[in-house]
Image (tube, rainbow, N blue to C red):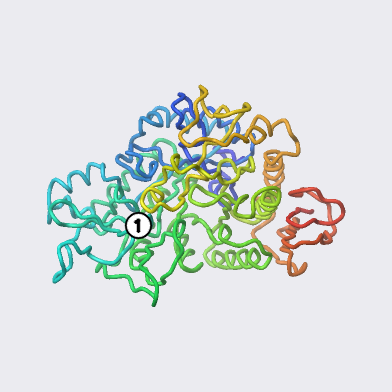
Amino acid sequence: MADVNDPIRSDWWRHAVVYQVYVRSFADSDGDGIGDLPGITARLPHLADLGVDALWITPFYTSPQHDHGYDVADYEDVDPLFGTLADADDLIARAHELGLRVVVDLVPNHTSNEHEWFRAALAAGPGSPERARYLFRDSPEGKPAGTPPNNWSSVFGGPAWTQVDDGQWYLHLFDSSQPDLDWRNPEVPAMFEGVLRFWLDRGVDGFRVDVAHGLFKEASLRDQVVEPGGTPVSGAGEMVERKVTDEPMWDQPEVHEVYRSWHRILDEAGPDRMAVAEAWTQTVESMAAFVRPDELDQTFNFAWLLADWSAESFSEVITSTLASVESIDAAPTWVLSNHDVMRHVTRYGGGAQGLARARAATLTMLALPGSSYLYQGEELGLEQVDVAPEDRQDPSYLRTGEVGRDGCRVPIPWGGTEAPYAFGPGTAQPWIPQPADWAPLTVEAQAADPSSTMAFYRDALRIRRDFAWTAGEDVTMLDAGDDVVAFTRGPVTVVLNCGTTPVELPEGELLLASGPVDGTLPPDTAAWLH
């Protein structure tokens, strides 16, 4: 863990391990079945013992919860579902006592339709200053009044426009309860600069910027050009497969001036404050633009998450990612799971093989220079849960009927032999029911097993701490065969066997392996050597 008071580590994020807390599903303090801020505070020792450097908390602001907090009604208060501002202060203070940094989620692309601004926009009517804070438009000239302003689609399915009673339409690239803001209106950046300062003054160490590639749309709001045989898709990346390359709603050049202004605000608060972008872009070069020296500090690297299980794919992601950030002296990031995607144990096949591959990919990731972002429960080896249709709550499922993201958001198990596995007081199932076979996977059960996945994560993070800052940022790829990823970073050699037969280990002292090793490295296994 980093010492939060260590001035030498003002750029602590460059080689940090950050643990994502999905607030609804981490720990419940009051027995209502939904996680909350006091629940997180009570469980912070688990994160300190695990060995992470920081936690990133998903939105806990006042919200009607149509998208579980990513529809914000008040950016400067805590939703009563999760606690109070005093609870947020207590969490930040306790985290700092334990040597943990705190990163909070910021949602600047859109507000809730219950935000005071949007309520005022509906009341004020067409042409008003209140509506100018959002993207309200009329139907196109010469077309019926029921025609949307353009052909854009929502990430959650269906049109990206909703018509209000007076005939105008408003843009929502996500759910209809999440109207997009017009960042060309000076009131919008001014409001968010105030939000940044509000939370910095309360002691947060950084921000995760949701949909950081959004904010600005091409000013004309022109139709999206669709490939022959395709359909319009406004893909943010996590929910839909990209079918077009023309994206007038994403990654516009004006967004970078916003992040330059935020960089100045973060610097004013202290050299140890940071921001990381969730930016789905079409190239590694456009991704790197978000982390130029005067913009954000990091951006999520989803290429590692999207890579299939092959040495070729992993090696290509490593080399292309490091090349993209080298010229701008930015720190790369690596992530395998989050609250928007299938858990990687399941993505790699599930069962024993999926878990073996997940541990191997994690060990490989943790050896790379830069920051690693872990998702709650992956240290327990949790798989994606097949949530019953009647229990699904993801707005993408409610809009389209397609299985959404609920399966990776099931509340995590802490102890006991049956649900709710000490997630909170009482015996009732939490907001998404937990599987009946999770008793061996609880934190309590794995703490007593030195061969558990949780023990493996603790060992990996403990050993990583010894070389994370001293091994340098240069990686040399090695040729160890078509099915093997191999590289050196400083004194550490990393080998990942993606094939089907054992391979020889290079010479050196074995520091850690993701599974049993006996002279050779078995399939679906990784190792660190010194």
| Picture coordinates of residue 124, whole percent (x, y) | 12, 48
- Left or right of 123? Residue 495 is right
- Left or right of 125? Residue 306 is right
| Picture coordinates of residue 510, whole percent (x, y) | 81, 50
Location of the N terminus (image quadrant): top right
Q: Nearer the viewer, residue 263 or 173?
A: 173
| Picture coordinates of residue 31, whole percent (x, y) | 46, 24
Residue found at the far right of this picture = 519
- The tally of labels here is 1
| Picture coordinates of residue 76, whole percent (x, y) | 33, 38
Instruction: Please identify the quarter of the rendering in which residue 68 is found.
Output: top left
**Residue at horizontal 15 percent and vertical 66 percent from the top:** 144
Instruction: Please identify the quarter of the rendering in which residue 58 is found.
Output: top left
- Does dot 1 land on a helix, a strand or a loop? helix
Residue found at the far bottom of this picture = 228
Residue found at the far top of this picture = 426
Residue identifier under label 1: 258
At label 1, the amino acid type is Val
Q: Nearer the viewer, residue 147 or 289?
A: 147
Q: Nearer the viewer, residue 412 or 228?
A: 228
Q: Residues within 10 Å of mark 1 (few under 14, many from 20)?
A: some
